[in-house]
């Protein structure tokens, strides 16, 4: 697999869609220029030899720490709903997703 | 002198001797805040009645009994707003206490108010706040640093006895340096993150901002320790961090990384640093040049790792269960898009975009994965260096506080200001910043002492030895 940094510029409108951000045309242009600069800067990571690096959590013998599988006191339904932008009948009211 | 000017340790003595009542302490701070905070704007909001009520029934025999503490506005306090200085969380009321807040309460502390910050802790100047900028108490035309700029400015301006902040890439230490107070970033896993609004989960730590090194140690002892609600938190109980305070540092080896003294550092910062090094030698420490060869890659690594984690963490702010929801939208995607566009400020959007991009299909290996690998190299640098020294000394920031607006238009320039603090988070280490001098224009300069993982007592010991043999920590900003 080719691990070199792609040279193609960032498609801000596309990435904004992935990030669920609705940006103005002015923002798309400004962010595009600024992020190009940042991406040009981070290209320097290509200089580092990362062969044989073992990532954290991938070392031999590494074990995840898990909590006990016990029911603990949590927020009551009313507390969980206190900040809901819209609610009805003890439930969060959200926009329709199935037509 | 006003009670507000006291340290935690001084105040504890006075409270135990019944020379002052906790209510007088709160009143004194509220007076101070009303006389200076219109100029500083360290606080996002205060709860005077609640603080006075807590003061009435405070138990001064507890470790922080009757001591007011300010809290950065991204840590949950039950029944209070937690805005993260973002419009997106305007009106939100936290329904639970963060673990650190439970511990402050159990120790008898009084919660005074919530301090300003860069939105979602993204920034180095506290200019990215939806509620307005905080100003540096030493020079009102300059930034207090960030992202915990409100906490640092509150402590420096004597509007708080001490404060909590959070540090993802320097957000406690850099504002402490800019404001002339003490800031401690604990080892990753030392303090529970339960109830801390997540920015970059593998880097974030809560820590104290205080007037003295001893106060930082005391406050850390209260908030540190195992928490079953945060599995990244060390399972062992936290030790006493202050046991080595007052022990001499004679014979201790301190590393000075040669890569940190390259071009670009402010000459006055460099001069202060050389004096600090000579002073530590005068105390009997052995200063040794060390190498951290991957230093030039730390900022690039950080801005890929931190933004990737942020883009995932901030996906939860979608306007469905809490926070603001854009009105009048036609469908779900428009609701998400407009809620987030209207709610988030520009720096937050920029970082979400960068993080989303570096995690997206086709770019993941080249950006995010490579950055995670370089991060391991940075960590190895420190592990190697700590074979030859017990702590590392550096400037906290390559420059003193910059002017408001000076760097806002150039994100990359703003990022480069974090060069000396970022690697500590990437490697999971602990570090403290404390005052080590002033520029001719009267701006504070910070000395950073970096320790290996779980060696807070060492950085506190070195910091204390330096602090107690100098007088920088006794100087106060000219606010009247």
Image (spheres, grey):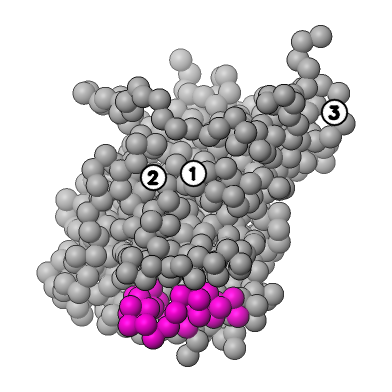
**Residue range (magenta):** B3-31
Instruction: Look at the picture and state if B56 lies above or below B306.
Output: below
Label 2 resides on the chain identified as: B
**Secondary structure of the residue carrying numbered label 2:** loop
Residues B159 and B444: in front is B159
Is residue B317 located in the magenta-colored stretch of the structure?
Answer: no
Q: Residue at x 55, y 48 (%)?
A: B78
Name the spot of residue B441 as percent of width and height, x first.
Answer: 55, 83
Question: Which residue position holds label 3?
Answer: B329
Instruction: Look at the picture and state if B254 lies above or below A45.
Output: below
Label 1 resides on the chain identified as: B
Instruction: Look at the picture and state if B289 lies above or below B322.
Output: below
User: Do the numbered discs 1 and 2 sit on residues whose CB atoms are within 8 Å?
Assistant: yes
Q: Do badges 1 and 2 share one subunit? A: yes
Q: Residue at x 53, y 51 (%)?
A: B77
For the question of whether residue B282 can be seen, the reply is yes
The quarter of the picture where residue B118 lies is bottom right
Cα gap from disc 1 to disc 2, whole angstroms: 8 Å
Q: Which residue is at the far left? A: B251
Question: Which residue position holds label 2?
Answer: B192
Disc marking residue B195? 1
Name the spot of residue B207 as percent of width and height, x first.
Answer: 41, 56
**Secondary structure of the residue carrying numbered label 3:** loop
């Amino acid at each position: 697999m080719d691990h070199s940094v792609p040279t193609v510029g960032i498609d801000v409108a596309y990435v904004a869609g992935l990030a669920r951000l609705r940006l103005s045309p002015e923002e798309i242009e400004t962010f595009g220029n600024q992020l190009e600069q940042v991406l040009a800067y981070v290209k320097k990571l290509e200089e580092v030899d990362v062969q044989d690096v073992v990532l954290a959590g991938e070392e031999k013998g590494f074990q995840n720490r898990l909590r006990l599988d016990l029911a603990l006191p949590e927020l009551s339904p009313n507390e969980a709903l206190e900040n809901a932008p819209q609610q009805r009948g003890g439930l969060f009211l959200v926009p329709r997703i199935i037509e | 002198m006003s009670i507000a000017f006291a340290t935690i340790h001084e105040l504890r003595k006075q409270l135990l001797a019944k020379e002052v009542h906790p209510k007088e302490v709160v009143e004194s701070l509220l007076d101070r805040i009303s006389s200076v905070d219109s100029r500083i704007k360290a606080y996002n909001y205060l709860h005077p009645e609640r603080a006075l009520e807590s003061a009435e029934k405070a138990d001064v025999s507890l470790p922080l009994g009757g001591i007011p503490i300010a809290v950065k506005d991204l840590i949950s306090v039950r029944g209070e707003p937690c805005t993260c200085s973002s419009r997106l969380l305007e009106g939100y009321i936290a329904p639970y206490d963060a673990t650190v807040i439970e511990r402050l309460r159990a120790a008898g502390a009084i919660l005074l108010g919530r301090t300003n910050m860069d939105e979602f802790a993204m920034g180095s100047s506290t200019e990215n706040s939806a509620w307005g900028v905080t100003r540096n108490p030493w020079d009102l035309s300059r930034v207090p640093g960030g992202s915990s700029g409100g906490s640092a400015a509150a402590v420096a301006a004597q509007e708080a006895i001490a404060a909590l902040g959070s540090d993802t890439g320097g957000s406690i230490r850099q504002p402490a340096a800019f404001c002339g107070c003490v800031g401690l970033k604990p080892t990753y896993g030392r303090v529970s993150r339960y109830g801390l609004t997540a920015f970059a989960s593998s880097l974030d730590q809560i820590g104290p901002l205080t007037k003295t090194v001893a106060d930082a140690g005391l406050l850390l002892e209260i908030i540190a320790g195992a928490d079953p609600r945060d599995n990244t938190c060390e399972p062992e109980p936290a030790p006493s961090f202050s046991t080595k305070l007052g022990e001499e540092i004679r014979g201790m080896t301190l590393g000075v990384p040669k890569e940190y003294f390259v071009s670009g550092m402010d000459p006055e910062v460099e001069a202060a640093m050389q004096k600090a090094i000579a002073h530590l030698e005068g105390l009997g420490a052995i200063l040794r040049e060390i190498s951290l060869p991957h230093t030039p890659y730390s900022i690039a690594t950080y801005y890929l790792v931190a933004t990737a984690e942020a883009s995932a963490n901030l996906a939860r702010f979608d306007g469905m269960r809490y926070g603001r929801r854009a009105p009048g939208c036609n469908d779900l995607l428009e609701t998400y898009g407009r809620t987030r566009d209207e709610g988030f400020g520009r720096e937050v959007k920029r970082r979400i975009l960068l993080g989303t991009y570096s995690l997206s299909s086709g770019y993941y290996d080249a950006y995010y994965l490579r950055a995670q690998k370089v991060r391991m190299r940075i960590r190895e640098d420190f592990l190697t260096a700590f074979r030859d020294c017990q702590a590392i000394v550096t400037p906290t920031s390559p420059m003193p506080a910059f002017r408001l607006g000076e760097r806002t238009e150039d994100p990359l320039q703003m990022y480069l200001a974090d060069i000396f603090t970022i690697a500590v988070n990437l490697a999971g280490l602990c570090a403290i910043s404390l005052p080590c001098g002033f520029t001719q224009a009267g701006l504070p300069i910070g000395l950073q002492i970096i320790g290996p993982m779980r060696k807070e007592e060492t950085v506190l010991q070195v910091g204390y030895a330096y602090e107690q043999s100098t007088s920088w920590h006794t100087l106060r900003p000219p606010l009247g």
